[in-house]
Amino acid sequence: MGKLVFERPIIKKLSSGMPSKFGMKTKIDPITEIDGNLIKDLISAYDSPLFVLSEKIIRKTYQDAKRSFSTRYPKVQFAWSYKTNYLDAVCRVYHQEGSWAEVVSGFEYEKAVNNGVSGDHIIFNGPDKSRENLKKAVLNSSLIHIDHFDELYQLIELADELDKAPKVAIRVNMDTGIYPQWDRFGFNYDNGEAWDALNRIMLSKKLDLVGLHTHIGTYILTASAYNKAASKLADLAAGLERKYGHVVKYIDMGGGFASKSTLKGAYLSGTDTAPSFDDYADAISSALINSGIKPENLPLLILETGRALIDDAGFILGTVLANKRLADGRRSTIIDVGVNILFTSFWYEHNIVPAQAFSDHTEETAIYGPLCMNIDVIREAIDFPALKTGDHIVINRVGAYNMTQWMQFITLRPDIVMIDTDGKPFVIRKKESIETILSQEEVPPHLQ
Ligand SMILES: *Cc1c(COP(=O)(O)O)cnc(C)c1O
């Protein structure tokens, strides 16, 4: 055993923390391995920082979600939300599990096609679909979710031009008791705009109205909001049945289920507050089966769950760069994981855990990233043991959004490794190098 590190004694006010109904917080354990791979081996093989995804957790979480819904409702289809994590390897795991693709840009649309998803299994959402994008989507029989009237009119034009009826749904926004309301996307239910759009589609006779869509927000902690939303969509579907004898094939409830990450300022941990897939499935399925839709016309239920499916499968491994005392005496620990690659630190209290055994002695610590920028804060204040330079840390539940919203600022983005279900690691996105960046730049002749 090596020489123990000296830790200077400190005087600390004892604060008992916030007990929940289950009592005090339990002691944290180190995370020393992921699916049989030691953290220190992963870092020595691929460098620090390093993103790691567990294929085992991705598949297990997907299967759990699928089971929750398909035991409560007869026809269920998931469509992977590309923007949550569009690494090809990740998307292909979902597609192998049977998921369609849900995309919100021309770029994502191309990625889905590249991943072998057939056109009629691509859902095209979002306010920005160019004429070229729409044309391609119509020709591929993709499911186009109309965001606004200008898009609706453009599709009617394209239907004539291409002599093909585009397959469409409308995105509907509504009051579900969740505020602020996401009313900037789609057509409003409560003021009659959505019904107006549906009548225009039906009367045009140029579009094939196949579905109804909503995405009420993200990290929604109240499952009952989905009950309200599904009831409102079912009401529109029943209206179409009554007025036109038209049956929509599907109702798409979007994404937005909360993951188990903890929001900033939350009183209790996300592991205690996030509803389960069963809760969401109960809320949605009861709205649909109790609606005015005729039983023989019960639509396919589509879910575009992103965050809640992948967050738990993602880890970032990092290394302690230094410890220092702030002017007020508080300890700060600087790690090599910054907000540039861990974008979700802006809204989550990320769970940071040492990757090796540590002393029981903890102290309030600010955890900073490596950027020369004041906003580079991973945790404002966390009860944390003293780690020394070179020690490793693991931040878990980072699978959603970080690998798409990250930015190349000051430094280069790291490798992303996926550990397959046999415990074997594969690089699924290579770390950037100076060449990666320079290959995109050009210097005009007079500056060479
Ligand atoms: C972002 C998005 C999703 C996924 O949302 P999560 O909160 O990650 O589940 C699904 N559908 C649409 C239209 C989206 O924009």
Image (tube, rainbow, N blue to C red):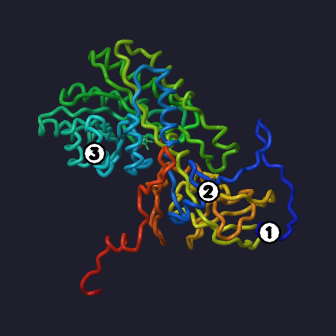
Secondary structure under tag 3 reads helix
- Image spot of residue 217 (x, y percent): 49, 40
Relative to 210, is 1 on the left or the right?
A: right
Question: Mark 2 highlights which residue?
Answer: 394
- Which amino acid, by three-letter code, is at mark 3? Val
Crowding at mark 3 (Cα within 10 Å: few <14, some 14-19, many 20+): some
Depth check, mark 2 against mark 1: the one in front is: 1
Using the numbered discs, state the Cα–Cα distance from disc 2 to disc 3 in whole angstroms. Answer: 34 Å
Using the numbered discs, state the Cα–Cα distance from disc 1 to disc 3 in whole angstroms. Answer: 56 Å
Crowding at mark 2 (Cα within 10 Å: few <14, some 14-19, many 20+): many
- Of callouts 1 and 3, the N-terminal one: 1
Marks 2/1 in contact by CB < 8 Å: the verdict is: no
- Which amino acid, by three-letter code, is at mark 1? Leu
The quarter of the rendered structure image containing the C terminus is bottom left
Q: Residue 4 carries which label?
A: 1
Q: Residue at x 53, y 50 (%)?
A: 314
Q: With respect to residue 120, does 114 lie above or below?
A: below
Q: Residue at x 48, y 53 (%)?
A: 425
Question: Mark 3 highlights which residue?
Answer: 113
Q: Which residue is drawn at 40% across and 22% down?
A: 75
- Which amino acid, by three-letter code, is at mark 2? Val
- Of callouts 2 and 3, the N-terminal one: 3
**Which is more toward the observer, 56 or 239?**
56
Q: In which quarter of the image is residue 157?
A: top left
